Amino acid sequence: MKFAFAAVVAVVGLCISTAAMADGAQDMGAGAMNRGGPYDFKGGQAIYTNVCQGCHMPDAKGAVGAGMYPALAKNEKLETAGYPVAVITHGQKAMPSFGTLLNDQQVADVVNYIRTNFGNKYKDKVKPEDVKAQR
């Protein structure tokens, strides 16, 4: 019983510290990820901070815990721009679809952000038209 309580305290502490690391993130409130869309975040960094980093972490190195959240940092799968567009809009395995929560511009912005940050250096840009073609 002591172990279970300690585990709960550790998880709550981790959640609080992760939330505190989200510098400049908007407070989305309890259950925000379960709310209907669309989200109104503007720019790739804001979308990553408010939507993606909760699972993929602020440094995009991913996490393992209740599930496995893949690293986006230095990720060769991001080389083909269509791959992250498809995963974000349609979901994959345990990752939910964000296609109804983010518009074409937002998906393009966050894909361009993760493909040019976190040690990724893929310079070809995704346009909203590219996202629309995958919906």
Image: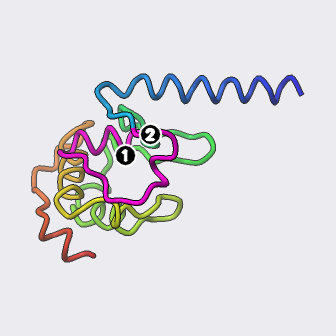
Residue 80 on the magenta span: no
Graded by Cα atoms within 10 Å as few (under 14), some (14 to 19) or many (20 or more), the crowding at tag 2 reads some
Contact (Cβ within 8 Å) of mark 2 with mark 1: yes
Q: Quadrant of residue 45?
A: top left
Instruction: Determine the residue positioned at 32% across, 24% down.
Output: 23
In the picture, the disc for residue 54 is 2
Q: In the image shown, does 82 or 34 lie closer to the viewer?
A: 34
**Residue 51 at x, y percent in the picture:** 37, 46
Residue 35 position, x and y percent, is 45, 55
Give the image location of residue 117, x and y in percent.
22, 39
Left or right: 18 as drawn, with respect to 9: left
Label 2 and label 1: CA atoms lie apart by 7 Å
In the rendered image, the quadrant that contains the N terminus is top right
Task: Classify residue 95 as left or right of residue 98.
Answer: right
Label 1 sits on residue: 51
Residue 82 or residue 89, whichever sits in front: 89
Q: Which residues are magenta?
A: 28-53
Q: In terms of image quadrants, where is residue 28?
A: top left
Is disc 1 surrounded by few (<14), some (14 to 19) or many (20+) residues within 10 Å? Answer: some
Residue 42: assigned label: none
Query: What residue appears at the point 42 percent right and 42 percent down from the top-left corner?
Result: 56
Q: Position of residue 47 (x, y in %)?
A: 28, 45
Residue 41 highlighted magenta (yes or no): yes
Quadrant that contains the C terminus? bottom left
In percent of the image, x 25 and y 40: which residue is there? 46
In the image, what residue type sits under mark 2?
Gly
Task: Name the residue type under label 1.
Answer: Val
Mark 1 element type: helix
